[in-house]
Image (cartoon, rainbow, N blue to C red):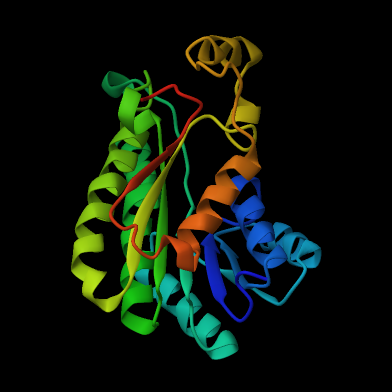
Amino acid sequence: MKFKDKTVLVTGSSRGMGKAIAMRFSEEGANVVLCCKNRLDLLEEVANELCGDSIVLQMDVTNLSSVEHVIDSAVERFGNIDILINNAGNFKNSMVKKMDEETWNSVIDVNLTGVFNCTKAVLSKTKTSRIINISSVVAQIGVIGAANYAAAKSGVLGFTRAVAKEVVRKDITVNVLVSGYINTGMWTRLPLELQEKILEQIPMNRPGKPEEITETILFLASEGAGYITGQMINVNGGIYM
């Protein structure tokens, strides 16, 4: 198995894409650190579905102390965190002229500051070799009512490039997967009329499959991707080229 004796931490792994990523790494032999802020019951269900060893931990990515506690607990259990997947995210729709400060801050805090906190803690406390951030095509094409989300996910792109240069001499790669519309999580909660409008913009005329994301992430985390760093990998069906 590709990741036997490796440990991967997947933020926001209670459902949706985070769950799919965690399960795929487990299938390949990895120890999995499952974490989210509130739904520990869902994390326990995910843990029961995994093939190998795992640990369930409560973590608020917006709080550095919370993140550091999780890292310490994971290292105590498994010895190291080899791979960090910054997947946790939230989305709150609002036009800018109507957007209140809380709506702006909450999305920036989770989607951007959360990536900083987790990356900082892992670099400080472990001998990681792979960091993979998740961004969104929304950062590239712009979407009405999503200025906060687009800003945060754009920030992840710049953050990835800068950190990749900071750690490259330590043989740590840092890349960002820029996801299109995937048939899980947020997509499934969109009204059908909106889904149809979005599909008209996608050359492949369908949402992506979760496995099309997970297989790309597995490659970026593998030894074969050791010469890839600071890159944006677009998986979006052609909506942005």
Of residue 107 and residue 215, the one placed in the foreground of this image is: 215
* Residue 60, visible in the rendered structure: no
The picture places residue 44, in percent across and down from the top left corner, at 74, 65
- Of residues 25 and 121, the one drawn nearer to the viewer in this rendering: 25
The quadrant the C terminus occupies is top left
Seen at 34% across and 65% down, the residue is 173
Query: Which residue is pictured at 38% across the width and 59% down the height?
Result: 62
Q: Quadrant of residue 93?
A: top left
Position of residue 226 in the picture relative to residue 13 (left or right): left
Horizontal arrangement in the rendering, residue 120 relative to residue 134 (left or right): left
Q: Nearer the viewer, residue 215 or 115?
A: 215
87 relative to 48, above or below: above
Figure quadrant of the N terminus:
bottom right
* x and y, in percent, of residue 180 in the image: 48, 31
Q: Where does the image place residue 181, in percent across and percent down from the top left?
A: 53, 29
> Measured from the top left, where is residue 221 in percent x and y?
48, 63
Residue 81 in the figure: left or right of residue 138: right
- 161 to 226, vertically: above or below: above
Report if residue 158 is visible in the image: yes
Give me the residue at 61% from left, 9% from top.
193
Q: Residue furthest right?
A: 48
